Amino acid sequence: MKNPIPPRVAGKLQTVATLAEVGIIRPQRPDRLLNALAALIRWGATPAAGYKAAASRFPDRLALIDESGTLTFKDVHERSNALAHALAAEGIGPGSRVGIMCRNHRGWVEAYVATNKLGAHALFFNTAFSGPQMADVAEREDPAAIIFDEEFAGVLDAAARGRKRFIAWHEPGTDRGGDRTLDDLIEGGDVSDLAPPPEQGKALILTSGTTGTPKGASRKQPQSLDPVAALLERIPLKARERTMIAAPMFHSWGFAHFTLAMGLCSTIVLKRKFDPEATLSLTAQHGCTGLVVVPVMLQRILELDDEVLRRYDLRSVKAVPVSGSALAPAVSDRWMDLFGENLYNLYGSTEVAWATIATPEDLRVAPGTAGKPPRGTVVRLFDEDGNPVPPRSTGRIFVGNELAFEGYTGGGSKAVIDGLLSSGDVGHFDEGGRLFIDGRDDDMIVSGGENVFPGEVEDLLAGHESVAEAAVFGVVDEQFGQRLKAVVVIRAGHALDGDAVKAFVKANLAGYKVPRDVDFVDELPRTSTGKVLKRELRDA
C-alpha cells in the first residue's frame, strides 16, 4: 500500500491545480515569465511585485478603467514608479506611514502601489469619517503625508496640519490651495524601477468605528497563494477578465478584491461614487464577469424601477461577491431571481479577513446563511467561558486562517482561544454545517430572562413588502431589564404603522422578540460599507 500524501502537500497540489484552472498559471513567453518570477522573488507577494510582474507578462492589457480613461499594466507600473521616486524625494521611505483618503479611482491604486514600492505603510482613511475622527486617527497613527481627494480637504484640515499633502483627484479649474497633485508628481518623476526596500510595507485598514473610535488593523501580506486559491475554488472568477469593484477599496472587502484582481491580472472597473444605475451600466458596458458590492448596494440597485433593471444585460456576470454587513434573504432571493445564480455571500471582518462563503446554492437552500469555511480556514464556536458549544447552539465565533491581522496599531487585539481569533460576532451552524450570524457578541439582549438577537427580527422585517430597511436593538427596560426597539424605513408608496410592525413580528416569531417600540425614519445612518450605526440610533 502506498503512503498517503501528507495533508500539507495535498493542499499545495490543490492550490497549484486551482491556479492553473483559473488561468493564473499558464504557458508564457520565457522572457516574460522569468521577469515576472524575478519580481516575485525580489519583492515578495506584494502589490509592487504584482504590477511589476503583470507589466512584464501583459504590458499592453488594460489594468484599470475609471472616469479618467484607461491604464495598461505597464502604465500603472511606470506611473507608480514615478510617484514612488517623487515621494522618496519628499522624505517618504521604509517604515513611513502615508494616509490615503480616496474614493475608487486610479489615484488610490497609484498611491497604494507607490507607497508599497517604498516599503512605507499605507493607512486607508474611511471617506465617511468626520473631521474629529480623522484628527484622532492622524494623531495616533502619525502619517508623514496624506494623499486625498480634493473634496475631503475640509474634513482633513486638522488631520493634515503639519504633514505633507498631495491631491489625488480634483475637479478641473478648482483652487487647490497650493497643494500638488499626484499627476504633478508623476509627470516629473523617474519611471525606472526602484530597488526593493529592506522591509515590506503593510496595509493599515481602519475598523468601521461603529462601536467607538476607529482602530488601525495591521495586515501583512499572506505567506502563500493558498488563501487566494481557496477563495477561487468557491467563486468562479478567472484570470484576465474584468471586475467592477463598487465596494470601497479602503475597506477590507474592496481591498481584498483589488488584491485578487491584481493576482489574476484582471481589469478593474472603478467609479468614484456609487450610483445604482451607473453600476449596472458600467458592468454591462465593459462585459464584467465580476461585480463586487456590499449588501446595501444590492438593496439600492434592487430599488430601481423594473424597467431600469431590465435595461442592462448582465449575462456576462458569473460572480457577485458580497460582504461587509448582513445580507437579508429577501435581497439575495430577489437578486438571483432577476440576474441568475451568481451571488456569493462572504462573512468576515477587518481582523479575521474572510471566514465563510455562501454559494448561490447555499443561499437558496438556507436563506440568510453566511456559508461554510473555505479550505485552510477554521471556524469554531465557544461560550463565554471558552468552551465549545453543543451542535446547533449559538456561540461566539472564532476564526483561524493565514489572513488574520497582526493586531491594532495602537496596541491590543481580539480575544484568542486555541489559536483562533474572535470575529466579534455570535452565530450558529445548521445541520448542513452552514454558519448563520445571530448578531454582534455585544448586541444580544436579555429580555425577561430570554436571550434575543436583533438580527433575526431585522431579517424578518426586511421581508415585509412595506419595509425598505429596518434596524433593531436593545434599550433599557425597568421591568424586563431590556426590550427591543425597531427603527423602520417605509418603502416608497407604502403605508405602515407601529401596530402593524408588531403584529407582523408576533405572527412569525416568539412573543418576547416583538419590539415594544417602533419608530419611523426616512433613512438609517450607515457607514460607507452599509453597516447601520446603531449607536447613533440609540443616542437619538
Image: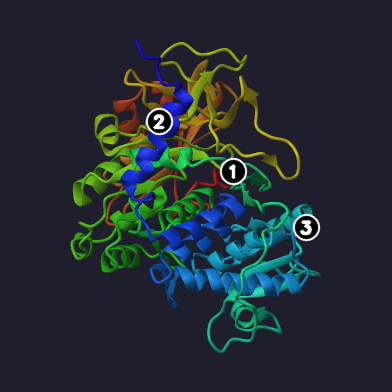
Using residue 194 as the reference point, say whether residue 471 is left or right of it. left
Using residue 144 as the reference point, say whether residue 301 is left or right of it. left
Tell me the amino acid under the disc marked 1. Answer: Arg
Using residue 313 as the reference point, say whether residue 400 is left or right of it. right
What residue is shown with label 3? 142
Residue that appears at 19% across and 46% down: 337
Quarter location, residue 230 = top left
Q: Choose between 277 and 194: the one closer to the eye.
A: 194
Q: Choose between 258 and 23: the one closer to the eye.
A: 23
Quarter of the image with the N terminus in it: top left
- The numbered mark, 2 or 3, whose residue comes first in the sequence reads 3
The answer to whether mark 2 and mark 3 are in CB contact below 8 A is: no
| Relative height, residue 463 to residue 64 (above, below) | above
Q: Position of residue 318 (x, y in %)?
A: 26, 50
Q: Position of residue 358 (x, y in %)?
A: 35, 35
Tell me the element at label 2: helix
Residue that appears at 78% across and 57% down: 142
| Mark 2 crowd level (few <14, some 14–19, many ≥20, 10 Å Cα) | some
| Relative height, residue 441 to residue 256 (above, below) | above
Q: Please, which residue is most extreme toward the bottom here?
A: 173
Give the foreground label among 2 and 3: 3
Marks 2/1: CA–CA distance: 19 Å
Tell me the element at label 3: loop
- The numbered mark, 2 or 1, whose residue comes first in the sequence reads 2
Marks 2/3: CA–CA distance: 41 Å
| Mark 1 crowd level (few <14, some 14–19, many ≥20, 10 Å Cα) | few
Mark number, residue 535: 1
| Mark 3 crowd level (few <14, some 14–19, many ≥20, 10 Å Cα) | some
